[in-house]
Each structure stands twice: as C-alpha cells, then as structure tokens.
Image (cartoon, helix red, strand yellow):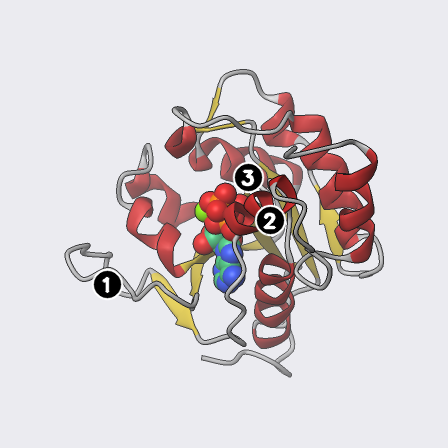
C-alpha cells in the first residue's frame, strides 16, 4: 500500500531497531525502501541494549554498535540514530522503545520496521497487544526467511513490503571478520574501517 505522494498532516517517522552487530547494507536498504514507499520524513535507527532474544549470545558492547550505526547512517539526511535503548538499563523490549520514541515525538506517526525473520518474534514480544496502538508495523522481505506460517499476526496490523534482496546478515559479517575474510560492500566503508581499527570480531 503505497502512501507516497499524499499530503501528510503529521510527521512520519520510521523506527529501525536492531542489534547492529554490525550494521550492514541489508539494514540500510530496508530503511531506505520503507522510507520511500511510506513517504517517511525520518528513519531513526535504534541499536538495542541487551537484546531479549540474544541473551545467551555474546554481543559487542553498545558504544561500538552505536558508533558503527552513526557512521553507516551519517551520509543520509533522513537517517538518525537514537540512544534510547542503549541508555535504558536492563533488557531491551520493543514496547519500551516505542513508548520512549512516542514520548519524544508526540505528533508523529510511527512505523516500526522489521525483517521477515523478526516478525515471528513480534507475537512473543512483551505487551505485544499494546504495540499496535503505538506504531504501524512494516515487515520487509529477507532472503532465506519466508513469512512464518505458524504465527498468527493480528488482522491488518502488519504490512509486508518486498524490498531488494540482500542476503547479508551480521552473523555472516562477524564470521568473515573473524576469519580475516573481506566484508567490503557488505557493510559501508566506514564500518569496514571501524571493525579493523578496533579489532572487532577477532
Ligand atoms: P544477526 O545475524 O546478528 O541476528 P542480523 O543481520 O539479523 O544480525 P539484526 O540486527 O538482528 O541483524 O536485525 C535488525 C533488523 O533488520 C531485524 O528486523 C532483521 O530482520 C532486519 N534485517 C537484517 N538483515 C536484513 C536483510 N538482509 N534484509 C532485510 N531485513 C534485514
Ligand atoms: Mg537477526
């Protein structure tokens, strides 16, 4: 459902949450495409603090993930980065992200952007039933993941948007960096340099 070209009374803000360990071009294409199709004024990237679905995994410290996200998004005038999740103590829940950003942007219409794989997790998110009141949800296609079948999403609450397929994951970027393999063109140049300079994922 393209809303492009319509006149909008309220500011339209996308929210792209993620671990961003590291941020890669798949994240950037997803945000750019949703911004285009939904006529967004801004997309706020929100690196998670302690991601609830990754509590058993080792995650790079928040400041490094935050800085890589700033570097990756700096050249796009519509992209910004928020510290709400990394500055909030404890485990990150999306409901808290949405409430914080809603408080900061009381007039805005919010669009929460997730990949097809994260949609499966939506229903397990804390206070899922209240999230629908806070934002629209846009699930973008992601290579290797089909929309989950067993999962029942509430009628009309989540849009699905087909985007250019980039089979990139942070897991693969980390694995490549660990083995000294190239990550050029999978992540922005500044992020390649940041990973090297700080010896991340070695
Ligand atoms: P990891 O492998 O560590 O889980 P990731 O590549 O899945 O990393 P996340 O930070 O977990 O990246 O993802 C943040 C959001 O971006 C999620 O909603 C995810 O579905 C989406 N996303 C990640 N990669 C892509 C991609 N290549 N195409 C579309 N959406 C993506
Ligand atoms: Mg992931």
Q: Judge left or right: residue 77 versus residue 58.
A: right
Residue under numbered circle 2: 176
Which of disc 2 and disc 1 is earlier in sequence? 1
Q: Quadrant of residue 148?
A: bottom left
Q: Quadrant of residue 136?
A: bottom left
41 and 182: which is toward the camera = 182
Q: Judge left or right: residue 195 versus residue 116.
A: right
Residue under numbered circle 1: 155
Q: Judge left or right: residue 158 versus residue 136.
A: left
Residue 9 appears anywhere in the view:
no
> Given this view, does label 1 or label 3 mark the residue nearer the observer?
3
Residue 188 position within the rendered picture, expressed as x and y whole percent measured from the top left: 75, 57
10 and 146: which is toward the camera = 146
Query: How packed is label 2: few (under 14 Cα within 10 Å), some, or many (20 or more)?
Result: some
Residue under numbered circle 3: 19
Label 1 and label 3: CA atoms lie apart by 28 Å
Q: Judge left or right: residue 77 versus residue 37.
A: right
């Amino acid at each position: 459902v393209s809303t492009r070209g319509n006149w909008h009374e309220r500011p339209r803000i996308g929210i792209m949450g993620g671990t961003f360990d590291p941020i890669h071009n798949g994240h950037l294409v997803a945000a750019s495409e949703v911004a285009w199709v939904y006529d967004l004024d801004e997309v706020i990237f929100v690196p998670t603090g302690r991601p609830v679905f990754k509590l058993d995994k080792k995650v790079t410290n928040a400041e490094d993930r935050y800085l890589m996200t700033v570097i990756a998004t700096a050249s796009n005038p519509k992209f910004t980065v928020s510290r709400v999740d990394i500055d909030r103590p404890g485990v990150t829940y999306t409901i808290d992200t949405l409430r914080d950003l809603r408080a900061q942007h009381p007039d805005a219409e919010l669009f929460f952007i997730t990949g097809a794989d994260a949609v499966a997790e939506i229903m397990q998110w804390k206070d899922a039933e209240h999230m629908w009141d806070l934002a629209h949800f846009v699930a973008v296609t992601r290579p290797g993941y089909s929309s989950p079948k067993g999962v029942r999403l509430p009628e009309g609450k989540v849009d699905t948007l087909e985007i250019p397929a980039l089979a990139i994951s942070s897991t693969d970027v980390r694995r490549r960096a660990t083995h000294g393999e190239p990550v050029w063109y999978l992540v922005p140049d500044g992020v390649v340099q940041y990973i090297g300079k700080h010896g991340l994922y070695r």
